[in-house]
Image (cartoon, helix red, strand yellow):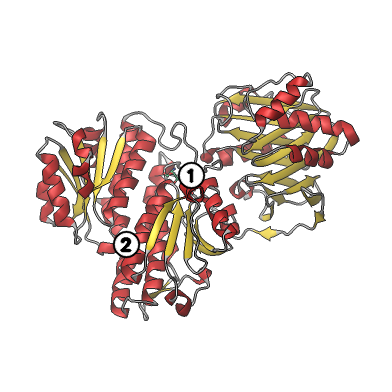
Amino acid sequence: MCGIFAYLGPRQASTVLINGLRRLEYRGYDSTGIAVKDGTIQLHKKVGKVGDLETILPTQVPGHIGIAHTRWATHGIVNDSNAHPHQSVNGKVVIVHNGIIENTRQLRTSLTVQGVELQSDTDSEALAHIIERELSVDNNPEKAVRRTLHLARGTWGLCVLFLEHDVIVCARNGSPLIIGQGDDEMFVSSDPHALAPYTHRVVFLEDGEIATLTSTSMKLSTLKGKDFNPSITVLEEDWGESELGEYPHFMLKEIYEQPDALRHCISGRLDRVQGNGRLGGLELEPRDLGKVPHVRLLGCGTAYNAAEIGQIMIEKLARIPAVAHISSEFRHNDPVINPNALHFAVTQSGETADTLSAVKEIHLKGGSVFGVVNVVGSSIARECGKGVYIHSGPEQAVASTKAFSNMVAALSVFALQIGRSRSTSKERGKQLINGLQEIPHLIEEYLENQGPILEAVEMIKDAKCVLFLGRGISAPVAKEGALKLMEIAYIPCLAYPAGEMKHGPIALLEEGSPVIFIAPNDHVKMKTISAIHECKARGARVILIHEKGDDIANEADISIPIPPVHSLLSPLLTVIPMQLIAYHTALALGCNVDRPRNLAKSVTVE
Ligand code: AGP
């Protein structure tokens, strides 16, 4: 989704900005642009990738101050004029903006009445014109931005460049913005990952804050005009190597990184002697966990699917009610919040606006929320204050793979921890720990012998629709499989709990319809077999993911065996063939595996 990068300092700004944009690319975008000041302001923007922008840049873009943007369209179609930066009518102000200005119609109308000719269909452009107008009042950049933002309603991460001032003013309200402090240079980014090559000393702007930056100074104030001192955070976790290496795509690389990512996630978090989980970041004692009335988990997309698996594990091990909620629905249903309940916000990016809003809703109503987050220092991690980092490392492909596995693993450790404080025996806890510690190796074993994935791809690649079915803990895995295939191969997919199939989706089945079943060797397997028979009786062809050595393989048209696994942890194995099926199907159809159309890695608008 939209990304911002800005620079002030001794280096050539255009080079730093282009590098910054490259590190934001993984978030997904449709157009890009930069503005650099050197006496005049040079502005270049274009639909397409950062590489496309580079082709239109002159060989020299002199200047040491600049702002840059990757746009993911919200207001206005994808075209060059809607791309950022946007310039004010007299060229004195240039802005890049993430977020949505809700009263844009009103602001645009009042500008038109004043004779301003708007150049784009965006909500953002209006801000540039109003800042320029306000600048004419007292020629004070910070005050001009502040007065403008008092007129705006909505969300913003905003960077403003001025023709007549050597400063960048930035502001945040609901859309992340991080200032990176170097030696006599200053950076701004909407994503801490993009700052990592330059500095680890950062200031996270909070909602309602404004920063006025030169290359050597940082002045922070609130929207109300109160100055305050910056609080510098040193980012310890470096995302490390995020190059493709020997892999053709990030998605494949990330699928193969799952065993090691899981090792990182569970390392130091399992107490083998007590058969217990140990998530120190939650700061919860057994006596606290013993009193919890219920657990709620929040997430979107893949994170929601992981949350549903967490829900099942928590109920099974702790015998208390747990429920997963889709974040985007949560606050709109005016939920009742019990301050004694535990809430978890599950998110890879830590920036998903829907999940952040749900967290704020719980806080507003007196509850507390723990983050289950990948990106260290992200907005949700900071809003929650406490929680669990899932330690997947950088996930660059839009389709989430290793973050899903680590969310499930982190939630399983929590389920164990709360289970042990209530109803799970030490013996059962030890079995789960053994199972969890075996998983990385079992995934490696499976990846070495993946089964007939390409045959499955042949069966589904031209299908009108693919049905994914699983029961119990495999029902959310079916959803995750369907989401993956739909996201990157654009094939319509339906996922259902297998028992629900006969209540509706069965109507879709005709001769040759492909159905993917997930049926590990657990207590609902026999029920799943009934659903397989019902499908086959209607001519459907069955791709079956099952445990090696299980007779259920005879039910399949294409059988994909995984190594036998602890029944509560089966999602960590059964999901892998589905990730591979989605990946290879997308390849077979010539789709852009890592950057699927219309999608963004980090969805920062509601
Ligand atoms: C996953 O493959 C998707 N790209 C998407 O559903 C994603 O999981 C969702 O947008 C939530 O993102 P988050 O984990 O960063 O909050």
- Work out whether mark 2 precedes mark 1 in sequence or the reverse, and give the earlier one: 1
Q: Give, as a three-letter code, the residue at label 2.
A: Ile
User: Which residue sits at x=29%, y=63%?
Assistant: 568
Above/below status of 175 relative to 117: below
Residue found at the very far right of the displayed protein: 138
Pointer 1 residue: 396
Q: Quadrant of residue 377?
A: bottom right
Q: Estimate how packed mark 2 is, as few (under 14), some (14 to 19) or many (20 or more) residues with alpha carbons within 10 Å.
A: many
Disc number at residue 186?
Answer: none
Q: Would residue 260 be seen by someone viewing this image from the given angle? A: no
**Secondary-structure class at tag 2:** helix
- State yes or no: Cβ of the residue under disc 1 lies below 8 Å from any atom of ligand 1: no
Q: Position of residue 128 (x, y in %)?
A: 74, 30
Q: CA distance from mark 2 to mark 1?
A: 23 Å
Q: Residue at x 31, y 67 (%)?
A: 316
At label 1, counting other C-alpha atoms closer than 10 Å, the crowd grade (few under 14, some 14-19, many 20 or more) is: many
Left or right: 48 as drawn, with respect to 300: right
Under mark 1, the amino acid is: Gln
| Quadrant assignment for the C terminus | top right
Front residue of 332 and 54: 332
